[in-house]
Image (cartoon, helix red, strand yellow):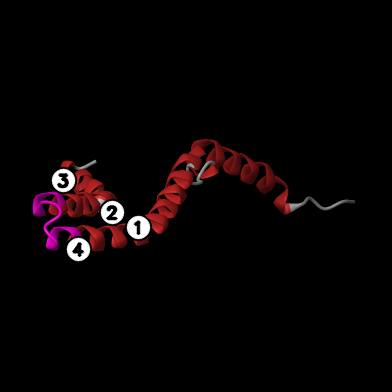
Amino acid sequence: MRQPNRNSGAAPWLQTLLATASLGSPALAFAQASPFMTGATALQTNILAWLTPIAIILVMVLGAMAMANRMSWGWCLGAILGIAIAFGAPQIVAWVRGMFGV
């Protein structure tokens, strides 16, 4: 005579529990980075890598032209402020988003 298996009722119960848990949390199934954000971050990194030496040379040229009285100091300071805003954009956006709780 065959003896009954003690674990015969646990397998369907466990399968039902796992199926319910996987259907109840679809966010975990799709937990991956957005392709748009990945591409935007890579583009931003590449642009900053290319523009950093160009911005340094631009500041040196602007300073030399302003010291030689070939251009106004206002233009020089405006360009430097623009460079600071361009390179500080991620920090500025994070600051503004934090200010408004987004």
- Earlier along the polypeptide chain: callout 4 or callout 1? 1
Frontmost of labels 3 and 1 is 1
Q: At 45% from the left edge and 53% from the top edge, which residue is drawn?
A: 46
Segment tinted magenta in the rendering: 64-75
Find residue 15 and report its horizontal and vertical position in percent: 65, 43
The circle drawn on residue 87 is: 2
Specify the amino acid type for callout 3: Met
Give SS at disc 3.
helix
Say what secondary structure mark 2 lies in: helix
Label 3 with label 4: CB-CB less than 8 Å: no
Residue 70 belongs to magenta span: yes
Disc 3 from disc 1: Cα separation = 32 Å
* Residue behind mark 3: 99
Q: Quick one: 21 or 95, which is closer to the camera?
A: 95
Q: Nearer the viewer, mark 1 or mark 2?
A: 1
Tell me if residue 61 comes above or below residue 5 in the rendering.
below
Q: Is residue 46 left or right of residue 8?
A: left
Q: Nearer the viewer, residue 64 or 74?
A: 64
As measured in the structure, the alpha-carbon distance from the residue carrying label 2 to the one carrying label 4 is 22 Å
What crowding class fits label 2: few (fewer than 14 Cα within 10 Å), some (14-19), or many (20 or more)? some
93 or 50: nearer the eye? 50
- The amino acid type found where label 1 is placed reads Ile
Distance (Cα) linking label 1 and label 2: 12 Å
